[in-house]
Amino acid sequence: RQLYQWHLWQKEEKFNVGLSLILERKCYKAFTSTEHTSSAFQRDVVYVLRSVGIKPKEEVLTQRGYSLDALV
């Protein structure tokens, strides 16, 4: 997981260092295969958002592999 995060940082900062395509794919798969569980705080935030009429999407996976607890 940390290797993939390092790789994303390299790409974001436009450094000329990174992973091979094969290793990037393996790291992405490991990074995104983790099971996500919501915390009490996350559930509270979603509850409050809904109580004021906002309907967030929960546990959204971004294209880069990050998991967002709630997306509004």
Image (cartoon, helix red, strand yellow):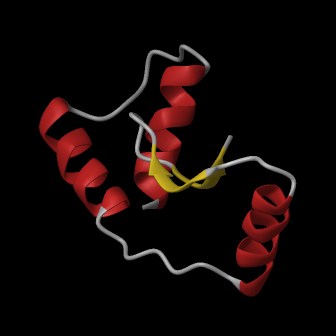
Q: In this view, does 32 lie above or below 17?
A: below
Which residue is more in the foreground, 58 or 7?
A: 58
Q: Quadrant of residue 69?
A: bottom right
Which residue is more in the foreground, 34 or 24?
A: 34
User: How many numbered marks appear?
Assistant: 0
Q: In which quarter of the image is the C terminus?
A: top right
Q: Where is residue 14 in the image (x, y as percent from the top left)?
A: 54, 13
Q: Is residue 10 above or below residue 39?
A: above
Left or right: 72, with 11 as reference point: right
In percent of the image, x 41 and y 45: which residue is there? 65
Q: Position of residue 52 (x, y in %)?
A: 87, 53
Q: In this view, does 24 lie above or below 70?
A: above
Q: Position of residue 20 (x, y in %)?
A: 21, 32
Q: Quadrant of the N terminus?
A: bottom left
Which residue is more in the foreground, 36 or 7?
A: 36
In percent of the image, x 38 and y 30: which residue is there? 18
Q: Position of residue 71 (x, y in %)?
A: 63, 45
Left or right: 10, with 17 as reference point: right
In percent of the image, x 85 and y 65: which residue is there? 48
